[in-house]
Amino acid sequence: MDKQYLDRLVSKTVGKKYIAGAVLYISSGDSRIDLISSAGNLQDHSKYYLASINKIFMSSLILRLATEGKLGLDDKFADFVSDDVVSNLHVLDHKDYSREITLKHLISQTSGLPDYIEDKQENGHIAIKDLEAGLDPVWPVEKVVEEVKKIKPHFPPGTRGKAKYIDTNHQLLELVVEKVTGQPNYHVLNSLFHELGMHDTCVVIDANDKSYVPVRYKEKEISISNFISSTKNDIVSTARDQMIFLKAFFGGYFWPKEKLKELEKWNRVFFPFEYGIGIQKFSLPVILTMFRKVPPMIGHAGSVGSVAFYVPEKDVYFTGTVNQQAKPGAIYQIILKILNRL
C-alpha cells in the first residue's frame, strides 16, 4: 500500500458518472500507513458535508454523558423532554408507546418512530425528494416533532430483531443533550471539535456558509444550505479531522475501550448495513466479492458517499467522501480494492 496506488484509485474514480471529486484518507492503528489522496473538486483539506456521519457524533455525546454518569442508556426519552414533545409521539394501532422510548432505542435505531426524511408526510411530500429536487426545506427539531406525530410509526420501541434506519432518532437526541448540558446542541458539538483539535469541523448554523464543497446530485450541485443550517446537528468537516474523531472513538474517548464490544448489538437496517448501539457496520457476503473475504467496517457512513470507518481485522481507518447523493457507493469501490491489497 503506497501513495502512488492510492492516488491512482482516487483519480480513476473521479470522472466516472456523476463523480466530480473524491478524497480518501487511510491510516493504520500503528501509523505505518498514513496516506491521503484527492482529485477533482475535492482537495486534501477540503471541507465537505458529512450527511449521516453526524449520527455517530450525536451518539458519542450520549455515550460520553452516560460514561460520566449524567444519564443512562436505558433512561426514558420522556424524562428529558416536556410533555408537549413526548405526547402522541409514537402511537401505533391505537396504543401509545411514546413513554416507552429509551435513549438506547434512539441511538440504536430501534425506536420504531417514523422517519421525517424518507417517510411520506401528511401533505404527500417526502423530504429527501424535496432536497434532491433542490427545494431546500428547513427542518428544525420542533418541526421534526410536529410532523413525526402525523406519520404512522413502524413498530413498537425495542421490538426484538427489528430496526429502522431513520434521521428522526438522532434529531430527538438534540433535546436530550440540551437538557443535560444546559447548552445548545450545536455549541456542545462545536466544543467537542475544539477539544479534539478538529479545527476545520463545525456544525453549520449559517445558511450563507460557503466554506464547504457543495453537495452534488447527479450532474448538478444542489443547494441544501437552509436544510443543513436548520437542523443544528449537521456537520461539515475534512478527511483529516474525521480521522482524529474516528481514532478517538475507537480509542475509548467516549465509551471505555474495553466496553466497545458492547455496542456491537447488530440489527439489519438496509443492505449492506447493520446498526448497533450508536454505530453502523458495513459488510458484504463473499458471493458479491468474487469469494474474497472482506472484513467488516465499523463506524458510520453518509448518503453523499462520506465514510468514517474502522476495520478491526486490518487495524486500519478510512475517512473521506465522493460528495455525490446519487452515487455514494463509489467510495466503497476504492476501499474494497485497498482492503484486498492489505
Image (spheres, grey):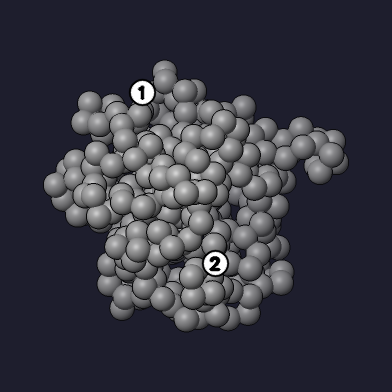
Decide: is 328 above or below 319. Answer: below
Q: Position of residue 184 (x, y in %)?
A: 19, 54
Three-letter amino acid code at disc 2?
Lys
Three-letter amino acid code at disc 1?
Pro
Dividing the picture into quadrants, the one containing residue 249 is top left
Q: Position of residue 285 (x, y in %)?
A: 77, 37
Q: Is residue 17 left or right of residue 29?
A: right
Which residue is nearer to you in this view: 89 or 197? Answer: 89
Q: Position of residue 41 (x, y in %)?
A: 53, 72
Q: Are marks 2 and 1 in contact (CB under 8 Å)?
A: no
Residue 5 visible, this angle: no
Tag on residue 256? Answer: 1
Residue beneath label 2, please?
120
Q: Is residue 188 left or right of residue 299?
A: left
Residue at 35% of width from left, 30% of height from top? 73
Disc 2 element:
loop
Q: Is residue 289 left or right of residue 140?
A: right
Which residue is nearer to you in this view: 182 or 31? Answer: 182
Q: Is residue 46 left or right of residue 188?
A: right
Disc 1 element:
loop
Decide: is 100 above or below 325. Answer: above
Residue at 63% of width from left, 79% of height from top? 219
On-image quarter of the C terminus: top right
Which label's residue is closer to the chain start, 2 or 1?
2
Q: Residue furthest top?
A: 258
Q: CA distance from mark 2 to mark 1?
A: 39 Å
Decide: is 144 above or below 277. Answer: below
Which residue is nearer to you in this view: 224 or 146? Answer: 146
Q: Residue furthest left?
A: 182
